[in-house]
Image (cartoon, helix red, strand yellow):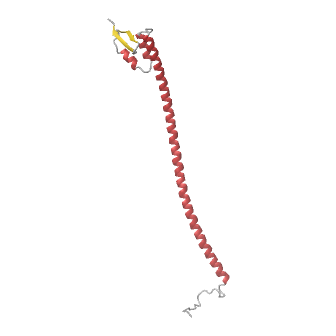
Amino acid sequence: MGDFEYDEGAINPLSSDCSSSDFSEEMELNAFADTNEKLIADLTNQLRHMNEEVKIMINRIDNTEEDILKRRDFVRDMERLYIEYTKQIGREEEQIEKIEFLTDHLKNNMITRDEVLDSMRVLENSQLAEHFTNRKSNTSIVSCQKDSDVFTSVASQ
């Protein structure tokens, strides 16, 4: 047969010192420990993977919250600008109406140049008032060309 040597010091599963049930229990325990080690390693890897996913999700949530706050601030700024521009447009429309009113009265000689100047000074947009104020004080409106809406002024003598 083969070169098998029998060692009397070796553990013999059939010997009276070590019963077969003890050996099978030890084998089962070793297999159970190996299985547990593998399960622990798998669970550890799964937990690490889940931890990374949670970190990514937290970053997304943080970014989303930051984006929401930025968008909310942007919307507030736009609303504020809209309100300011609406108010400004309203003031400008009022000024336009006042200027048109004064122009109509001036064309029809229903108002004097000094009254126009006083009214123009009241307006927030003083550019037109400055235009009239910068003229010589002895200038008076002589005629109005109705076709072209151009005022002709001549210095009174």
> Compared to 27, does 138 lie above or below?
above
Q: Which of the 4 image quadrants contains residue 46?
A: bottom right
List x then y, in percent, for residue 32.
Answer: 62, 73
> Which quadrant holds the C terminus?
top left
For residue 141, above or below residue 69 = above
Residue 74, horizontal then vertical, whole percent? 49, 38
At x 46%, y 20%, the residue is 96
Residue 126, image x, y percentages: 41, 19
Q: Residue furthest front?
A: 147
Please tell me which residue lies in front, 117 or 109: 109
Q: Tell me the residue at 59%/68% (across/down).
A: 39
Q: Nearer the viewer, residue 85 or 32?
A: 85
Identify the residue shown where x is 46% and y is 15%.
Answer: 101
Query: Which residue is found at the position 60% from the left and 70% from the top?
Result: 36
* Residue 118 place in picture, x, y as percent: 43, 13
Residue with the most extreme bottom position: 1
Question: Where does the N terminus fall, quadrant-wise?
Answer: bottom right
In the rendered image of this protein, does residue 90 appear above or below residue 15?
A: above
Q: Determine whether 25 is above or below 87 in the image.
A: below
**Quarter of the figure with residue 21:** bottom right
List the single residue furthest toward the left. 157
Left or right? Give the position of 23 relative to 88: right
Please give the count of numbered marks on the rendered protein: 0
Q: Nearer the viewer, residue 9 or 147?
A: 147
Going by the image, does 45 lie left or right of 152?
A: right
